[in-house]
Amino acid sequence: MTKNKFFVGLATAALAANMTVWLTACSSEDNPVVEPTAEEKAQMDAPGFDEGNIVLTFAALSDSHIMVDPETSMQDLLDKILAMGYDLDKLSPDTRKLISTVFRNKEYFRAALPFLARQTSHGLDALVMPGDLTNNGFQQEIDTLLKYYQQEPTINGKPFIYCSGNHDIFSEDEGAFTQKMRTAFKETAAYSADIKEWGANDSRHSVVGGIHFIQVNVNNYEWSNGVYFDDVKQWLDQELRVATTEAPDKPVFVLSHLAIKNTVTGSDFYAPTTPDMVWACDYIKPILDKYPQAVLLSGHTHFSMNSERSILQDKFTMINMGVIHYMITDYGYWNMNEGNSYIPEDFDRHPQGSLFEVDKNGTTRIRNYDFGLGKQMGQPLVLPAPGYKNSLTRYGWDRANKPGPTFPSQDIVAQVVDGKTTVTVPRASGNGSQVLYYLVNITDEAGNIIADNHKYINDLLITAQEEDMANPVTLGLGTLAAGHTYTITVTACNVWGTQGDSLTATVSL
């Protein structure tokens, strides 16, 4: 068989799906396997994830917000808030929620690593965190983080790959935090995988198991969208060039606390209560666009990973990591403080993190977990190895073109109990996507609009699997004025905002 015929046959869909097994069977000392060229790879689908040949396994967590071990009570904390001049009665519902759980982040962080280690038979090779390691950047918080790192056998003695976040530099500037980290961890294996001295703004370049990690730190969070200065951008470009030249068939993981604007979950977040909040930036996107091997791991938004929008492939791959400390979601859901909140009621019981595994071919498998539930969220994500025709096509923008959700039946019930109106519908199906919320419209008998596209979020973000979600779904519509007949319409919407089926009911009060 000639080389050309060999690869023409191999490029067929059936053979491509089983390429690794087939090549192994055909290989021998007398008939060695010839690796496909870059041009030939570009015409083939990448091999599937090779469970038997994993070269790297790492835990990925974000926004742990480690705080000083409190020697204070909740009442002491409230007293301090009062002493600062705040009126507790005037704090927003979201702020009150955060205060009530401020001390719980450390227990979640400490539980996450052994949990992830139990999900793999080969252990963890590294800990990866894209920012907000601490809540304020205090030395005591860094010391607490060091203590946890050294006391956790699944990660102690392994590389600690991280970038800083906005919370890490609250108390001092960027350089102060990273230098304090460097001093605190200098006698550990945290920096054992670094291949050169720290770069611009204390950026780092590490290699673990033949896989490159590049960590860059935002220069300024106070401007409207976060800023990377030119020296950091130039350093990132240079190190990506080095990494992709050295390992052209492997992913390169890039850590940035901020995601790229208007891409993954939370990167387009806006709330009128925090209009100046920095959530994403575009400064490094032109650089990453040049490197299809790049896999950007970001944090900061505190959005749930249980959304297909947490991953996006365009010219490179973007993944927004789940959060340890607390979860938020989009603003404006009517069942969250009448649309005036962005922190769900169950925000503190669902810390999340991920287990990344890279096989010898460069294919990556990602399993996302809810540590509160102790369960895997959804199905594993698989990033095909770089260089193949399907390397960047699995999680693209085209997913937004899927049709809207459908209801399995026309059953809808509206009723009034103790003066409160509710409407109950069967749980909608996503039609290939995920159902995130329901739109409710209400008019009276005269055509007056009582509720205009009120959004009601469901329990997708805090439920491990779709089959575990509430069914049927009951939406509280509040108090409607007596003496009228109301028409209530409920429309199912997916995570991309696409509307699907609608159900309508009538209720007289």
Image: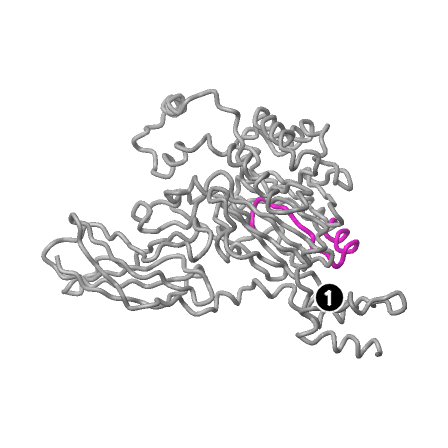
The local crowd at label 1, few if under 14, some if 14 to 19, many if 20 or more residues have their Cα within 10 Å, is few
Tell me: 349 left or right of 415.
right
Q: Image quarter for residue 450?
A: bottom left
Q: Image quarter for residue 493?
A: bottom left
Q: In this view, does 269 lie above or below 28?
A: above
Instruction: Tally the marks.
Output: 1
As drawn, which residue projects farthest toward the right? 30
Q: Where does the magenta region start and end? A: 239-259
Query: Which residue is painted at 44% across and 59% down in the image?
Result: 495
How is the model colour-coded?
one colour
Query: Of residues 470 and 273, which is closer to you in this image?
Result: 470
Query: Of residues 48 and 298, which is closer to you in this image?
Result: 48
Q: Is residue 172 above or below residue 432?
A: above
Q: Image quarter for residue 8?
A: bottom right
Query: Of residues 3 and 308, which is closer to you in this image?
Result: 3
Q: In this view, does 258 lie above or below 389?
A: above
Residue 159 magenta-highlighted: no
Residue 247 magenta-highlighted: yes
Query: Which residue is painted at 33% across and 55% down in the image?
Result: 455
Tell me: 337 left or right of 391.
left
Type of residue at label 1? Val
x then y, percent, for residue 278: 50, 44
x then y, percent, for residue 366: 60, 53
Q: Find numbered disc 1 in the image and state the secondary structure of the residue it sits on.
A: helix
Query: Of residues 201 and 18, which is closer to you in this image?
Result: 18
Quarter occupied by the N terminus:
bottom right
x then y, percent, for residue 7: 77, 75
x then y, percent, for residue 274: 41, 42
Query: Which residue is painted at 55% across and 34% down in the image?
Result: 110
Q: Mark 1 points at which residue?
A: 21
